[in-house]
Amino acid sequence: MKLSAGHLTYCTNIHAGEDWSSHFAALKQNFPEIKKELSPDAPMGIGLRLSNIASVEILLGDNMAEFKQWLQKNNAYVFTMNGFPYGGFHHTVVKDQVHAPDWTTDDRLAYTIRLFHILAALLPEGMEGGISTSPLSYRHWFDTEEKLAEAKVTATKHILAVAEELYLLNKQTGIYMHLDIEPEPDGILETGREFIDWFEQDLLPRGIIHFTEKLKLTIAEAEELIKQHITLCFDVCHFAIGYERYAEVLNELQQKGIKVGKIQVSAALKATFSNDNSEAVLNEFAKFNEPIYLHQVIAKVDGELLRYSDLPDALSAVDEAEEWRAHFHVPVFLENFGLLQSTQSDIVEVLSIQKSNTFTSHLEVETYTWGVLPNEDKLPIAQSISRELAWVKNELTN
């Protein structure tokens, strides 16, 4: 739905269905109820997630035409997409494979360009579109600094190929779209700092050489091209896990002319430790341990940050931490989970900045770990999504 702070929606990766027909069936089952609750009389956007298989299938036969008709009938539109998970995201072990194939591969490049052509066909006239994606790769796949550096170079070249495609599409059609890079723990780009450094030290220098030589642009034009089409996906959960200073990151981005393509409104789990509660807090975290997704933990120990690649690693360590923050996209409307809390206050802080100094027009709620919640907090999925969007809408409008 369109608010003064931007277009607000939810990411459809919450709906199972890796092929197009299954995913479309889930949309038809859930979205009308959500829209009726949140935006009955005005258009409402969708944050579409298509697996690689679904992205191929939607282009077959009459599938795209049928989807467009359904969007029109339901007064709905697509303005953002989640291009991070390429393959299965439900009912299978995802873990680090959420990055596969990564940005060092032609498969990731082809998939992302296909998504952009789909988005270009769906975007309402005059509206910008964005697609979020992996932060290049999973850093622990590379066992030496040399291999990690090589992966970053190859990934950056593929990112620039997307920028070139988006530039040419804009020239041909007038449609403006951007690729939103999503830092997360254990990605090659983990933090706002690493994203900015990569943007300035890798992406811009390589891109300026490429675009001045191939497209005969000036240095200023090449830099503008890159800054228009390659942006940051500000996933609040991921930034909260890293204890980042949001205002400082956003101010630096603004000063350097680097754009934020999308806010992913999401919440992590956290807890502070004391001599009296350590064992009980660890037991509570253990209840959230599940086998599908990675749940990286960043512990604050004597003021320093100690990183664990998954929750079981953290649970088996003895670090005498002051605080833990764990990668769980838990419902944003809940602040407490017994002895644990969510990073809801971080969402409130980011949305407050967005209200006072709008830095993007795309906002997408991304919650997908509903299964780990206590039974008393579980509702039918359409009701749960509506409750989340209502909470965010309230934060943005009050």
Image (cartoon, rainbow, N blue to C red):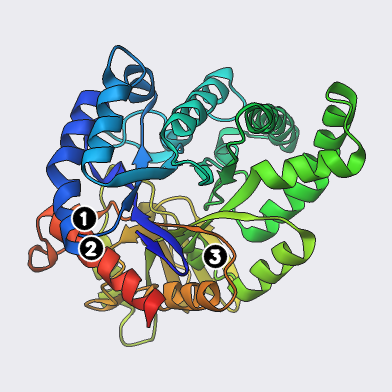
189 vs 320: above or below: above
The Cα atoms of the two marked residues, 2 and 1, are separated by 5 Å
Pinpoint residue 142: horizontal percent, then vertical percent.
Answer: 62, 33
Residue occupied by mark 3: 242
Q: Amino acid at mark 1?
A: Lys
Q: Are marks 2 and 3 in contact (CB under 8 Å)?
A: no
Q: Is residue 366 visible?
A: no
The outermost residue toward the top is: 61
User: Circle 2: is it few (<14), some (14-19), or many (20+) Cα within 10 Å?
Assistant: some
In the displayed structure, does residue 180 sit left or right of residue 115? right
Q: Tell me if label 2 and label 1 are in contact, CB under 8 Å.
A: yes
Asked if residue 197 is positioned above or below residue 55 in the image, the reply reads: below
Q: Identify the residue at horizontal 88%, vertical 44% (top origin).
A: 220
Question: Is label 3 in a helix, a strand or a loop?
Answer: loop
Q: Nearer the viewer, residue 394 or 120?
A: 120
**Amino acid type of disc 2?**
Leu
**Most foreground residue, 28 or 40:** 40
Write down the quadrant of residue 65 in the picture.
top left
Given residues 72 and 129, the one toward you in this image is: 72
What secondary structure is found at the residue carrying circle 1? Answer: helix
Q: Which residue is mark 1?
A: 35
Q: Position of residue 25 (x, y in %)?
A: 16, 33
Whether residue 43 is visible? yes
Residue that numbered label 2 is attached to: 38
Quarter the C terminus occupies? bottom left
